Amino acid sequence: DRLLKPRRQAGLGRGIALAGGHHGWNLAPVGDAVLGHVRADSSPGYDGRVTGFSRRLIDRSGYEGEGFASDYDRYRPSPPEVLLAVLMTHAGTDHPQLVVDLGCGTGLSTRAWAGHAERVIGVEANARMVARARAASGAANLEFIEGFADETGIGSESADIVTCAQSFHWMEPAPVLAEAARLLRRGGVFAAYDYDVVPVIQPDVDAAFTAHVAARSAARSRLGIEAGGATWPKSKHIDQIRASGLFRFAREVQCHGEGTIDARRLIGLAHSIGGPRALFDGRAPEVDATLATLHATAERQLGDRTWPTVTGYTCRLGIK
């Protein structure tokens, strides 16, 4: 009952559900409720498609650069309470026994569940982000494991909710959906949710930010820098969930989160979008130009004030 699948080759870790870990099988205790049912055979064989696709994106993203994980954690938004409430309502529980967060990054989406769930497990393949997730976690019910989303090693039908927060486009959909369905108990919920990259702040700032994001996207395409969203568009997540045949009901839900932001945090957020500028190696002057315009616009329009902001979320969910 307590056999664990051997680690992947080339120093890649195992997979579980919410963020981090270190290389190898140095698992934090997951408790009898989960470890007592760990299987030696996880998802059906998919010939390492998730590993290859996700590993390639990570290697080319610049997300493993020194300091990027801490900036990502500092400036990216956390999921709003209303989104968590929607998932708990659809799962039929106000206190999930286990939430699994696949591709959890620095644990922003993991930590949000600490006050709601009995146990939360994060899975993340980026070693630096896993380390950041562990360093930022102070709750005893949070666990972070380094690994891939298609083969977590977590027990079958042990989770109430499985999430991919701003991460499903980094993964091959079919094997990850198969693993999510295996993890979920009957009536459990899988959710792939994403936030609008450009928050609602002030019209001129919003326009400058939108132009910068568009410049980055065009530069990546022109230079052949692979992006997960180009291979697996977020708008198609709901189609992937439905086409899998693994969920008895699927739907899309819109909600929003409210917060505050100032010019410094806005520029920090912009730097965290789409990887560091070093990724372009000086070959995309339009990225630098639009960032400079955003910086000047933010300073002019926002000044030294803190402004209210609204971030839109789109959640694609499937009920097992």
Image (tube, helix red, strand yellow):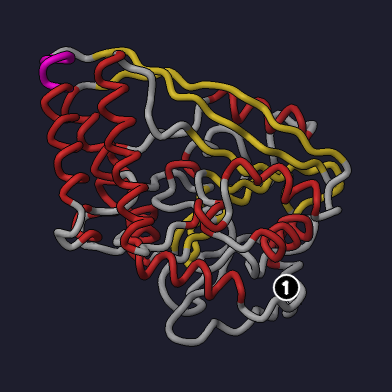
Tell whether position 74 is magenta.
Answer: no
Q: Which image quarter holds the N terminus?
A: bottom right
Examine the image and state in which quarter residue 82 appears. Answer: top right
Residue 40 in the image: x percent, y percent? 72, 80
Residue 61 in the image: x percent, y percent? 35, 61
Above-or-below relation of 283 to 300: below
Above-or-below relation of 273 to 169: above
Examine the image and state in which quarter residue 5 appears. Answer: bottom right
Tell whether position 302 is magenta.
Answer: yes
Is residue 188 left or right of 69 when viewed as pictured?
right
Instruction: Say which residue appears at 66% left-offset and 42% top-offset.
Output: 191
Instruction: Say which residue appears at 74% left-offset and 57% top-offset.
Output: 183
Q: Nearer the viewer, residue 239 or 136?
A: 239
The residue beneath circle 1 is 42
Q: Amino acid at mark 1?
A: Ser
Tally of numbered tags: 1
Question: What is the chief secondary structure element of the magenta stretch?
Answer: helix
Is residue 110 left or right of 203 when viewed as pictured?
right
Q: Nearer the viewer, residue 77 or 29?
A: 77
Instruction: Say which residue appears at 76% left-offset and 42% top-offset.
Output: 318
> SS at mark 1?
loop
Instruction: Say which residue appears at 59% left-offset and 28% top-offset.
Output: 83
Residue 115 visible to an observer of this rendering: yes
Give the magenta part as a residue range.
Answer: 298-304
Residue 122 visible to an observer of this rendering: no
Residue 125 in the image: x percent, y percent? 46, 66
Q: Nearer the viewer, residue 103 or 111?
A: 103
Q: Residues within 10 Å of mark 1 (few under 14, many from 20)?
A: many
Residue 219 in the image: x percent, y percent? 30, 52
Q: Nearer the viewer, residue 127 or 135?
A: 127
